Image (spheres, grey):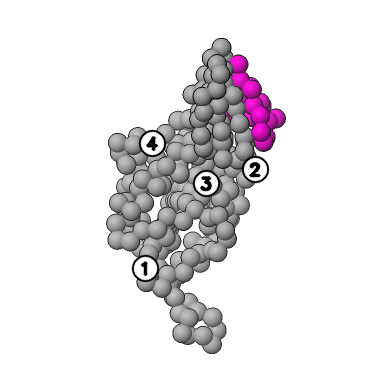
Amino acid sequence: MDKDQVNDILSANGFVLDEERDIQYGVQLRYNNGSVVNVFDKGTVTPQGKDVGEVKELLGKAPAKKATSGSQAIAPGSNNRVFVVYGHEPQCRASLDAMLRRWGLEPLILDQLPSEGQTIIEKLEKHTAECQFAVVLATPDDLGHRVDHPDEQAFRARQNVVLELGMLLSKLGRSRVAILLHQHENMERPSDIQGLLYIPFKDNLEKDTGLLLAKEMAHAGYQIDVAKV
């Protein structure tokens, strides 16, 4: 097994490569979760650092095996579906849909999927199992403020967007949910949870978010042609 094969498997299972170092007779791959893998020229692989047992198991089996808690692993190129949540802003919705499809991805949108007698929650749980990443488009669709504090009025994403965001964070994990946040005047963030992946944009969603979103999805195991970004 060479370094590219090792990294393909680990990247497909949620590991994000931080650094690659030359070592005697091989190379060392260092990941942002503290895992370290030494790959030697003769094909020997020795994990160290954090999650050694998990790394050994992943490298000894198919890359589609489940990895980090709260996320689902995919083999490179085996799944092109991405879950998409949005509100009422049609232009941003159309731009996001077109951008993802141009990258060769298939957006799954809750209100366009068959209900089959399921509740919204059941429907979301079923179809998120088909995806390894979600994009939440937060646009200024609503206005709100605390009771008796009209001076605090601010634009907000719709309540269904916030609800679905929370469910996606629970199902996929923070590293696999990107929130595209419209930089509208006096726009609230849907959540103040630390560590969420916010990607702001102004008037041109594709121009402002394309490269950043593509990088995050590539880290999650999606194969995206950079020439199309």
- Residue 189 position, x and y percent, is 48, 65
Give SS at disc 2. Answer: loop
Quarter holding the C terminus? top left
Q: Residue shown at 30%/38% (left/top)?
A: 228
| Mark 3 and mark 2: Cα distance apart in space | 12 Å
| Mark 4 and mark 2: Cα distance apart in space | 25 Å
Q: Which residue is mark 3?
A: 176
Give SS at disc 3. Answer: helix
- Residue 158 position, x and y percent, is 46, 67
Give SS at disc 1. Answer: loop
Q: Which mark is residue 184?
A: 1
- Residue 207 position, x and y percent, is 30, 51
Q: Is residue 219 visible?
A: yes
| Mark 1 and mark 3: Cα distance apart in space | 24 Å
Q: Which residue is mark 4?
A: 224
| Mark 3 and mark 4: Cα distance apart in space | 15 Å
Task: Judge by depth and name the residue closer to the eye, 224 or 195.
Answer: 195
| Mark 1 and mark 4: Cα distance apart in space | 29 Å
Q: Which residue is mark 2?
A: 69
Q: Residues within 10 Å of mark 2 (few under 14, many from 20)?
A: few
Lower position in the chain sequence, tag 1 or tag 4: 1
Amino acid type of the residue that numbered disc 4 sits on in the rendered structure? Ile
- Please determine whether, in this image, residue 56 is positioned above or below residue 91: above
